[in-house]
Amino acid sequence: MTTTNSSSAPLPDHATHLFSPYDLNGKAIAPNRFFKSAMSEVLAVQGVHLPTDGHLRVYARWARGGTGIIVTGNVMIDPSALGEPGNVVLENDTHLDRFAAWADAVHQANPDAQVWMQINHPGKQTPKFLTTHPVAPSAVPLGKALENTFATPRALDHEEIEGLIRRFATAAGLVQKAGFDGVQIHGAHGYLVSQFLSPHHNRRTDQWGGTPENRRRFALETYRAVRTAVGPDFPVSIKMNSADFQTGGFEGDEAFELIAALSAEGIDLIEISGGNYESPAMTGAKQSTTEREAYFLEFASTARNHTDAALAVTGGFRSVRAMEAAVASGATDFVGIARALTLDPDLPKHAADNPDYTCDVGRPSTGFRALDMMFMIAISYYESQIRRMARGQNPDPSMSAWRTVLQSGTALGKAAFRKRRA
């Protein structure tokens, strides 16, 4: 049996909340509550940094699969500051036609789907082989033996900080011009915005640090500049950590205060995740029980008291029952999904057809921990699935981790044999 929504589209009885549309402040209508969270595709040609035909194929595939809001992998705002080889960069309109084609590929595949671009600056989370002179709020190196991979950063001066805020705004305006439906600021996972928020990484004593209010200034000023660039009617989101999961990191009251401050400024959607390179909760390292599929749902439930903005929770969702329960509970408006969509790009359709649907992403491994870490199998395995879709193939959930090692070496060359991430 099914019920219908206001447009008479059928809703599966086992997931009426999950498949109901959502009005984002009159700025956009999401057809359902599936939110494809950002994953770095690593598909751009090194040195070119533009969307490829592979990007178009992958995102059209997700659109045909029925995902309501599709967020791109992190698009960098500065070609001299990359998080990894193969990043896309958007800093001017020289090749805006390639970005327009990216957005158009989604809209042609599914006119109801929303495609939002995530914009980012890595700060000090850029490997040495990409830059030996990274920048950050403070000259604090990454810990946990990451100093061999990431150089100690140089602290930004005031003029540079304001310049980076302008870069975020410029990129956002270009996102809108290219025909995307929304923009997301990456403020999680230890990248630049997240570094400013963290008491551990931000040890400044000027207007950009020293107090919770000053530490969140960069995030707020970036949002304000982005909003000015795109106007009042274009959806703007931020991805933020519920916690960094490290001693002295961003967490607790400061996170709720940021949510309240962004909401007062008029942000449309807040995506909640957690962790960073030093403590990678976003890859599943912080899951406490097998039953608790949403790592950050409890935080979102409390966050409801601090915001009227839409909330998306990303991390660990696998079964349609858990997804439906999360939305029905009111703790979140959207279910953020990443790795599961690389294995099953038709996940929303399958979830609609089967009340017992579950997508198990597993824990791929070569059997050698050092090799798994070197190639970051917990992430690169799913990038391999994205590359398959980029070639027009279906994902292969049976693919071995060893195949990922070989493909990474071929796709990324010498850079693959250095630690691209923590």
Image (spheres, grey):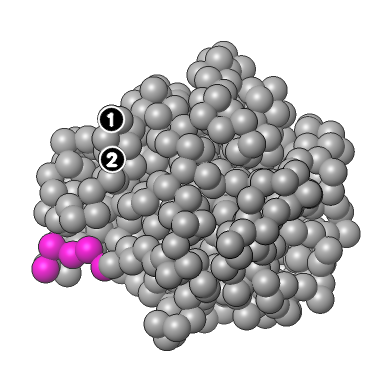
Q: Amino acid at mark 2?
A: Asn
Residue at figure coordinates x 55%, y 15% from the top left: 97
Give how far across and how far down residue 83 sits, in percent: 43, 45
**Which residue in the protein does label 1 denote?**
391
Asked if the stretch drawn in magenta spans residue 364, the answer is yes
**Where is mark 2, residue-wise?**
394
Q: CA distance from mark 1 to mark 2?
A: 9 Å
Look at the image and tell me in which quarter the N terminus lies: bottom right
Give the amino acid type for the residue marked by disc 1 in the picture. Arg
Up-down relation of residue 61 to residue 198 (above or below): above
122 displayed left or right of 3: left
| Magenta residues, start to end | 363-367
Residue 28 placement (x, y as % from top left): 76, 41
Write the residue at 27% across / 58% down: 376
Quarter holding the C terminus?
bottom left
Image location of residue 237, percent across then percent down: 70, 50
Q: Main secondary structure of the magenta part?
A: loop
